[in-house]
Image (tube, helix red, strand yellow):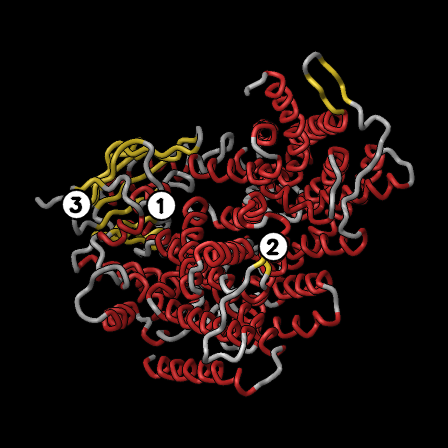
Amino acid sequence: MTEPVLSLKGVEKLFGSFRALGPVDLVVGAGERLGIIGPNGSGKTTLINCITGVYQPDKGSVYFEGRDISHLQAHKRARMGIARSFQIPRPFTGMTVFENLLVPLDYCHVEGSKQERARAVLASVGLSGRSSDPSEKLTQLELRKLELARALVGNPKVLIADEAMAGLSEEEIDEVLAILLALNRSGVAVIMIEHIMHAVMRFSQRVVCFETGRLIAAGTSSEIAENPLVQKVYFGE
Amino acid sequence: MRKNSLVFLAGIVIVLALGFLMPWLLRNPFYFFAGYVVLQYVTIATGWNILGGYAGYINFGAAGFFGAGVYLSAFLFTTFGLPLPLCILAAAIVGAILGVLMGYLTLRIQGVYFAIATLGLVVVLETIVHNISGLGGASGMAVYGPRPPAWSPGPSQYNFTVMLVIAVVSVALARWVEISWIGRGLRAVRASEDAAECSGVPTLRLKLVACALSGAVLAAAGAPYPFYTSFVEPVTAFSLIIGLNAIAMPLIGGTRTWVGPVIGALLLASVQQIATVTISSELNILFVGAVLIAFVAFAPGGISDLFGRNKGRARS
Amino acid sequence: MLSIDILLNAIVTGILLGSVYASLALGLGITFGILHIPNIAHPTLVVAGAFFVYTLAQWGLDPIVAAVIGLVPFYLLGVVLYAFYSAVFERKGGANVLQSLTLFFGLSLVIEILLSLGFGSELKSVSVSYIGSSLKLGVLTVPYRLLIPALLAPVTIAAVWFYLSRTNSGTAIRAVAHEERALSIAGLNPASVKRHAFGIATATAVIAGAALIMVGPIEPFAGRYQIGRVFAIVVLAGMGSIPGSLVIAIIIGIAEALVSSYLNPSWSPGVAFAILLLGLALRPQGLFGAAR
């Protein structure tokens, strides 16, 4: 049994007196496909921010491949192999699509030349044709692809996709799913936070549900779908 | 990319050659007085832009760094007789330290606090200088400059040439930062700091580097000033118009590349040099202030943007 | 060396001075602390308020009366400023904080120059009958020129704080920074709420200006010496905490008075800034505000 890629033990995050998260225990196995669901405000984004280092947990610890990273700065965690895409895409405006991918490559070690790696990743997400276009001029789907491309260009060990499919059509959702599945096949763990139920259920090996900062249910897709707690959270009593 | 660098290098050589030759060709020292000021502002605008334009962190206290350079240089020369090039170097080092200090204290929070702290910095530095009698206090300090070396026909021409070298070095530095991985990281920080951090960019470290370089250039711009005027006083060394121009010139010329501040400085400084003869310094500030507001409101990308040199949205 | 007399007088002076600073910071506490609009032109507006009071005082009006008269024109000025600000930035879909800072910076310089052109650069003061003498309480000597303005401040602060916490429009102001959608659902126009808030903030500037000119003479560029103090107060008190700003202002006032008495008055402009930097280094979120 290999070391889990991520492990959270008793992680809590408070803002003043407001408890945004926790305590949370969560383990993500190497190469796993984990889905995270839960209503808005249930702490999913806070969770990601604690994992990626945007926030430091007030209590508890975050482990990456067995190593305690709880107080490590975000950029160091990114270099270690924790990648994320943002809910609302944040392209590096003022730079071309290609340059966007060069930025992480300045800091993450990859084999071969940076330019080749960037080109290869662009091709894998279908953005080769937009390589020299300014990143401000992309469509919604292309922006989301760029988000993902930028996240995976540095060969991460785990990718956190935060609502990467919000606002997309069915075909576009399939495209993004294909990218994530291909990535997972190469050994990268993928954590998918989504509201689009059929996508999460199809994609994930395991699903966890959050509510008001706590993990209230965990299981396979079908187990979660039938879980009364989850149903209550989404549909009310 | 290589070709561009060679072209740039050739350009530098030509500019420097002209700069060293002109004193022997033009007899009227006025050109060198005015030219000094224009070059000073090219340096100031370029230095400001390394942090303000590339990283998007606005420094309202450029006058603080400039004045610090002025007084350090004056002090080192009058007290220790340090030769001018060393005074400039010392000013640059102190400017860098000041920049890093400011940055470290305020950049960990938000960019707004950095900007506001720089406003206060000018007052603080001016207060300190006021209170140190060794620096002449409010009434100022006279500086008897070094004799110009043999290859320069006179003091005003010598100062001009010195300032030219400083300007060229600053612009070359800004260009190097811009095309290097530092510039790329700073652009990422400017576009989206969170996304940059999560992409592995050490945002704080890069911002501090930009603070150091910016502070160094701004202070270096002030180092030859005591020899240019032969007299330094807090009011002019920490003058309002310096801080204002430092922002207005890159804003007008364009903040994305090294070319913008140069254009903005050449334009605005020349206009001001011509105008100083005819209008009061207050009206000058009014004019620049109004121009600044106009550009911020209607053309935040500056002239470079207006002419389509860089099609890109300003930082949002 | 450490005479109790000097110490007590310094502390009392500091408290009074701090109170005046708090009234200066009040408007900024509203625009920057609550609305998150970095109006660094506020200290200059206070100076403009002081000149307004000065002008009316030349016609024999009492400064406090002048300030009350100035409330409406300055409120309108605030409304106009906000309209300009939002026209410029809202057009582009939201304000870039640093661009708006630059806008206000340019504005403050323009206002200062206009004041300078209009009034000249010499110091101006007002002479009022009750200013000039002092209240003697045992070992304490409290000059009226400090006492009266210092009393103005808590009154204004209390009034504004009461307005913000107890009235509907006040609550709307407090909410508008982060709850724009909720407000529009409730039928309120966020833009007009902000406009109103900006107007109130600018109206406080004329009161603070009256306080300032009663304490001592002013010149057009006096604003820049206040910026350090005013921002130290707003930032260290934590964004949006108006009662907290009074506490911080008094701390700064006392620190300045002590430095003035024991070192040299000319060091005092730097005191607030030093406190600000220290505070930021130790506790970035301020002493009273919520952690980020």
Residue C80, percent across and down?
74, 52
The answer to whether one can see residue B249 in this image is yes
Question: Image point 75% across, 36% down: which residue?
Answer: C207
**Alpha carbon separation for disc pair 3 and 1:** 19 Å
Question: Image point 28% across, 35% down: which residue?
Answer: A217
Residue A25, percent across and down?
25, 34
Depth check: B178 or A236 in front? B178
Of badges 1 and 2, nearer the viewer stands 2
The residue carrying pointer 2 sits among few (fewer than 14), some (14 to 19) or many (20 or more) residues within 10 Å by Cα, namely many
Furthest toward the top, the residue is: C138
Q: Amino acid at mark 1?
A: Val
Q: Secondary structure at mark 1?
A: loop
Residue B29, percent across and down?
61, 78
Q: Name the residue carrying label 2.
A: B233
Label pair 2/3, CB-CB below 8 angstroms: no
Q: Chain of mark 2?
A: B
Q: Secondary structure at mark 2?
A: loop
- Report the disc number at residue A54: 1
Tell me: residue C283, above or below residue B299.
above
- Report the disc number at residue A65: 3
**Alpha carbon separation for disc pair 2 and 3:** 61 Å
Q: Amino acid at mark 2?
A: Glu
